Amino acid sequence: MILVAKDKAFKALHHYYTTRSDNPLKKMQSLIALCNKLIRILFSIGKKKFVFQEEKMLKDTPPYSCIYSRTNSSLFTIKLTFNK
């Protein structure tokens, strides 16, 4: 699916959903969960008129700490570290 292939935040969530130790999801189940998350995000953006922020979405994922750093081209990069 393009969402997981192109977007770093959704790719990180897909990886988390499929590899977590407690109740890992199969790939299709993970994609459906991500599509539901995308629908909720789009609905909230339309209703509340705010800007989507990846770091806000990823901070709810328990075992990952997301560190965002600005590069010279003003793009955000994500570094994922696994916390035990």
Image (tube, grey):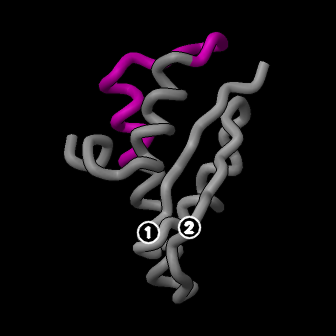
Q: Estimate the x, y position of residue 83 in percent, counting from the top left.
A: 75, 25
- Looking at the rendered structure, the secondary structure element under dot 1 is loop
Which residue shows up at 31% across the image and 42% down it?
4
Numbered circle sitting on residue 83? none
Q: Estimate the x, y position of residue 54 in percent, counting from the top left.
A: 54, 61
Of the 4 image quadrants, the one containing the C terminus is top right
Of the 4 image quadrants, the one containing the N terminus is top left
Which residue shows up at 45% across the image and 82% down it?
46
Q: Name the residue beneath numbered marker 2.
A: 70
Residue lying farthest to the left in this orientation: 2
Kindly identify the amino acid type of the residue bearing the numbered disc 2. Arg
Kindly identify the amino acid type of the residue bearing the numbered disc 1. Leu
Residue lying farthest to the front in this orientation: 72
Q: Which span of residues is magenta-colored?
A: 20-35
- In the figure, 77 relative to 48: above or below? above
Which residue shows up at 48% across the image and 38% down it?
12
User: 59 and 41: which one is in front?
Assistant: 59
Magenta residue check for 3: no
Which residue shows up at 27% across the image and 50% down it?
6
User: 6 and 36: which one is in front?
Assistant: 6
- Looking at the rendered structure, the secondary structure element under dot 2 is strand
Q: Name the residue beneath numbered marker 1.
A: 75
CB atoms at circles 2 and 1 under 8 Å apart? yes
Q: Mark 1 or mark 2, which is nearer the start of the sequence?
A: 2
User: 82 and 35: which one is in front?
Assistant: 82
Query: Which quadrant of the figure has residue 82?
Result: top right
**Residue 5 left/right relative to 12:** left
| Spatial CA span between label 2 and label 1 | 6 Å
Query: Which quadrant of the figure has residue 64?
Result: top right
- In the figure, 12 relative to 26: above or below? below
